[in-house]
Amino acid sequence: MTAADSPDTHRAIEAVWRIESARLIGGLARIVRDVDRAEDLAQEALVAALERWPETGIPKNPGAWLMATAKHRAIDGLRRGPLLERKHAELTRDLEARQEAAVAELEARLDDDVGDDLLGLLFTACHPVLSREARVALTLRLLGGLTTDEIARAFLVPEPTIAQRIVRAKRALAEAGVPFEVPRGKDRAERLSSVLEVVYLVFNEGYSATAGDDWLRPALCEEALRLARVLAGLTPGEPEVHGLVALLEIQASRSRARVGPGGEPILLLEQNRARWDQILIRRGLDALARAEALGGANGPYALQAAIAACHARARTAGDTDWPRIVSLYEALARVAPSPIVELNRAVAVSLASGPEAGLALVDALVAEPALSGYHLLASVRGDFLAKLGRTNEARTELEKAASLTRNARERDLLLARARGL
């Protein structure tokens, strides 16, 4: 096997792309003012990396290499672009001046720091010209670097649906001439809720990867948390922004305890709480207090943060205030009803009132279309059945859950639990 064929090299390039693609697209979109073109340039830089790095080695600063390669391609495109070839008499002089200015701007920025380009890209992808579903799908694609398959699983919808949303979203942005910028005033407030949702989903994909060989993708979690903190700085009077920050801080505090020495998943109630990051917990509790002080205690993210805080405050799993968590899930179901919330409420009810009570709630969700291929429904049901001594049924459910998940680590865990019965 040659260096070019080395699977290790290609995995390393894939890892670099996961980390750097959002910054790369954001920086390019700021300059070329076209999200679709920015993604194309980024992909061209990736192709160049796949061609060169297996032979030359991965550079010390791969992100800078990708950005420089993409920007040089953008400059070449401007110089050879079809606009310059259209020598209409009334446009020639002005057009050439504009194109040369654009080239000069690109060259001047080759070494610029990306800064808040990610935030600008986030708000651009969340523009009101797009549907809510398209905003989330496009942003996960551009900022999270997720495949259409991973996004589809996050939303429990078919993959072709997500692919169509992304293509149409980029076309709509181009046709509407949407500026690449962080909005101000009323426009920012109107777009904030979809931005928060996107940041939340990016974090979740890093916290519990839907596919691949890793249980965690720390880079995604860190990027989502960074964006959430930037948003909190931009909108200090928005309680739900602080609620989201609180939720992500507390969730991130468990990251070290969620993975064993061999990379295997460790579930919440089995984690060594001494490994939870107390600094992140304190930051999360402070953010939750700010959200509540601003009157946002009943916001969807603040309620989820309050649930996470119940776990963070419990010294052991046995100290968890499950009745309180049940009441918080009931409040969450009122303001943001969904089958996923009901499934989580069933887990809390089982721990507060016993597995039989939880099973009754889960059985009511079995016919829910949105959960038909959701592996955690079968996993939760298997746990309840195992606790009730219905071993054969429990094993069947856990094996079903293993067949539905795309994450290798999670599949191994579910199969081990099934064998353990």
Image (cartoon, grey):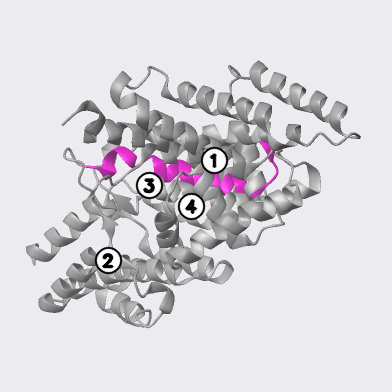
Whether label 4 touches label 3, CB < 8 Å: no
Amino acid, disc 1: Asp
Image location (x, y in percent) of residue 366: 34, 80
Whether label 1 touches label 4, CB < 8 Å: no
Does the rendering let one see residue 155?
Answer: yes
Tell me the element at label 1.
helix
In this rendering, the answer to whether 165 lies above or below 63 is: below
Compare residues 122 and 145 and report the one nearer the observer: 145
Magenta part of the protein: which range? 232-259
Please give the residue where the numbered disc 2 appears in the rendered image: 404
For the residues marked 1 and 4, what is the alpha-carbon distance in whole angstroms? 24 Å
Amino acid, disc 4: Leu
Q: Decide: few, some or many residues near mark 1? Use Cα within 10 Å; few <14, some 14-19, many ≥20.
A: some
Whether label 3 touches label 1, CB < 8 Å: no
**Could you tell me which residue is drawn at 37 percent across and 51 percent down?**
311
Judge left or right: residue 192 versus residue 10: right
- Of badges 3 and 1, the one in the foreground is 1
Compare residues 354 and 132 and report the one nearer the observer: 132
For the residues marked 3 and 1, what is the alpha-carbon distance in whole angstroms? 28 Å
Give the number of the disc on residue 207: 3
Amino acid, disc 2: Leu
